[in-house]
Amino acid sequence: MNLISLLTAFVPWIAFTLVAEAPLGNPLMCLTLAFIVGIVLTVLTSYRQLLQGYILSVVTIVFFVVFFILIIGLKLYHLASYISVLSMLILTLVCWATMLFRFPFTLQYSREGVDPERVKSAPFMRVNYIITAVWGVAFTLSTAIDAFLLFRPDPGLMFWDNLKWVFMVLAIVFTVWYPAYVHKQRALQALAEHSDIFKKIDSKVSGTLKGRQE
């Protein structure tokens, strides 16, 4: 899996959230700047993926452009109150919808530089389903938190907003760890199988030599 390419695809979303929630005084200015930063970073970090139709990159640029037009261009300011929930919801839908259609979005990053025959294998697909599901869970929980805070805007509850970052970090750590873990397990399994073969060969050779000596 091209981990750098995959994790880089989330950079525009992270930057968008940080800028939009920055305490700069004017929320509309922050949101406008967040959209611009999100669009620019998406183009800079995912230019090749956009041309190749990567699902996450396409959804990202469409989200930023559409809501920039709606909120900033058409002045539908009431949508700004829902932008945090909508962003998490969109990412959640990307995860579960791509799994539903049997094409987990991480597959496009995993198959970069990988033999086409291996991409079609069940173990390869299983890894992508699991990683995509982990991101799906992280985004689902983040959506739930944002929805809860939207309907209960109590300053005393805002510490829950930090949990979104915890979920993201855990998803990133899992994405980095799990492919390496699976690769290590397969290597150990292959080594065990080869060890059994060598033992059988050694046993046959020893038996042959013993028979000749007798």
Image (cartoon, rainbow, N blue to C red):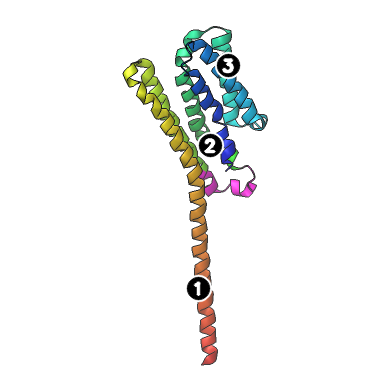
Mark 3 or mark 2, which has the lower sequence index? Answer: 3
Mark 3 or mark 1, which has the lower sequence index? Answer: 3
Percent of width and height locating residue 59: 57, 25
- State the predominant SS element of the stretch in magenta: helix
In this view, the residue in front, 163 or 142, is: 163
Quadrant of the drawing holding the N terminus:
top right
Q: Marks 1/2: CA distance? A: 41 Å
Q: Label 2: how many residues lie within 10 Å, few (<14), some (14-19) or many (20+)?
A: many
Q: Are marks 3 and 1 in contact (CB under 8 Å)?
A: no
Percent of width and height locating residue 13: 53, 26
Q: Residue at x 57, y 20 (%)?
A: 64
Eyeballing the image, is 144 above or below 6? above
Say the numbered circle drawn on residue 199. 1
Q: Residue at x 54, y 80 (%)?
A: 205
- Give the residue type at disc 3: Val
Q: Disc 3 marks which residue? A: 66
In this view, the residue in front, 153 or 138, is: 153
State which quadrant residue 57 falls in. Answer: top right
* Residue 62 visible in image: no
Q: Is residue 207 left or right of residue 46?
A: left
Q: Nearer the viewer, mark 1 or mark 2?
A: 1
* Residue 73 visible in image: yes
Instruction: Find the magenta span and give its range.
Output: 112-127
Q: Are marks 3 and 2 in contact (CB under 8 Å)?
A: no
Residue 183 falls within the magenta-colored stretch: no
Eyeballing the image, is 175 above or below 157? below
Q: Residue at x 58, y 16 (%)?
A: 66
Q: Marks 3/1: CA distance? A: 64 Å
- Give the residue type at disc 2: Pro
Q: Marks 3/2: CA distance? A: 24 Å
Q: Disc 2 marks which residue? A: 104
